[in-house]
Image: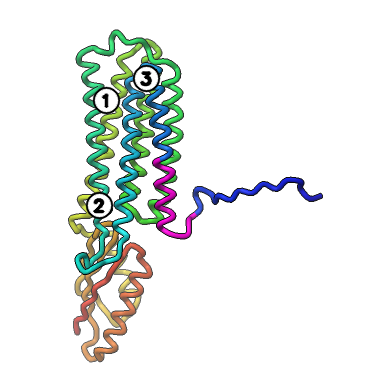
């Protein structure tokens, strides 16, 4: 018997890889901006209606997520621009610039929340307050679930795109989920007769945000300083190169990060009796194999020495 009604869902699954990077960036940005706007509005209402300073602080943190997503999306779009005469090495570091801006926004947000919570504790402004209402507790629980889901969603696409800016944005979502856990504990404690815990929770949220901001800024600055890709990666790369041919040895191997991409400088020793054409063909083969094996490697520069 044929079914009477057939349901169709024209929209693809949220976790199905779109056809292009541009489509992924648009989808990720839209989900994050709309989700954070609705969530922050709900948490702000719950904080005001439920008389919870911790929930108001958490709402401000969620509002900063909207700005961070806009910055991350702009940074990723600009970093994907093709190289031009003025920027022959491309625009990959624009992601690092976006991550620095994002980390700075997060850092300022954390300091503001911490200042408010600390002033409430030091000046006893929490004492005359009534305990928060249940709506603030429910808002914290909903925020934990939503922000954790947004973390995994953003992290999924950040890995596909190889984007440090969107990965920073993902951890921004995770920091919001952790801060909501602190808010949940503080609000719950305040409802049990300890109002000071609401302000203590704001301080815990502040520390959590500052830690995430530091990690984002540290990662961005390291990528802007052309640091090496690390001994473990270079050893793996060296083993891979030597496995390609028995006719070569490595005289020098340097790696560096340029934004979210990697560059390799390589000096290979070959038989000095080889013709220039033969040496070039072997070097070109190794060049192509490296870029095929390591997706993050944008360019390999090979110099050939006779042994």
Residue 26 on image: x %, y %: 41, 51
Q: Residue at x 23, y 77 (%)?
A: 268
Q: CA distance from mark 2 to mark 1?
A: 29 Å
Q: Front-most of 271 and 262?
A: 262
Q: Residue at x 44, y 45 (%)?
A: 153
- Looking at the picture, the colour scheme in use is rainbow
**Residue 83, quarter of the rendered image:** bottom left
Residues drawn in magenta = 17-33
Dot 3 or dot 1, earlier in sequence: 3
Q: Residue at x 21, y 69 (%)?
A: 85
Q: Residue at x 31, y 49 (%)?
A: 165
Q: Is residue 223 left or right of residue 159?
A: left
Q: Secondary structure at mark 1?
A: helix
Badge nearest the viewer, 2 or 1: 2
Residue 51 on image: x %, y %: 36, 16
Residue 230 covered by magenta stretch: no
Q: CA distance from mark 2 to mark 3?
A: 37 Å
Q: CA distance from mark 3 to mark 1?
A: 19 Å
- Location of mark 3 (residue): 48
Most common SS among magenta residues: helix
How many numbered marks does the figure carry? 3
**Please, which residue is most extreme toward the right here?**
1
């Amino acid at each position: 018997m044929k079914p009477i009604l057939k349901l169709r869902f024209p929209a693809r699954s949220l976790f199905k890889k779109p056809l292009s990077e541009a489509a992924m960036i648009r989808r990720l940005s839209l989900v994050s901006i709309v989700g954070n706007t609705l969530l922050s509005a709900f948490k702000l209402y719950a904080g005001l209606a439920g008389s919870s300073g911790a929930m108001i602080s958490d709402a401000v943190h969620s509002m900063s997520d909207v700005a961070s997503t806009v910055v991350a999306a702009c940074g990723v779009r600009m970093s994907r621009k093709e190289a031009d005469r003025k920027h022959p090495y491309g625009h990959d570091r624009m992601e690092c610039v976006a991550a620095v801006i994002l980390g700075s926004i997060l850092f300022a947000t954390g300091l503001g929340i911490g200042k408010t919570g600390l002033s409430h504790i030091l000046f006893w402004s929490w004492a005359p307050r009534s305990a928060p209402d249940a709506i603030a507790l429910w808002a914290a629980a909903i925020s934990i679930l939503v922000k954790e889901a947004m973390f995994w969603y953003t992290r999924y696409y950040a890995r596909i795109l190889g984007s440090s800016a969107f990965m920073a944005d993902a951890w921004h979502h995770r920091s919001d989920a952790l801060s909501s856990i602190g808010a949940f504990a503080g609000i719950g404690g305040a409802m049990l007769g300890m109002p000071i815990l609401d302000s203590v929770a704001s301080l815990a949220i502040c520390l959590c945000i500052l830690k995430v901001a530091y990690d984002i800024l540290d990662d961005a600055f390291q990528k802007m300083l052309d640091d090496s890709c690390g001994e473990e990666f270079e050893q793996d790369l060296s083993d891979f190169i030597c496995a390609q041919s028995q006719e070569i040895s490595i005289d020098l191997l340097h790696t560096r990060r340029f934004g979210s991409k990697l560059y390799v400088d390589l000096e290979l020793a070959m038989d000095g009796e080889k013709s220039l054409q033969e040496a070039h063909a072997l070097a070109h083969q190794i060049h192509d194999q490296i870029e095929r094996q390591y997706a993050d490697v944008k360019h390999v520069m090979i110099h050939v020495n006779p042994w």
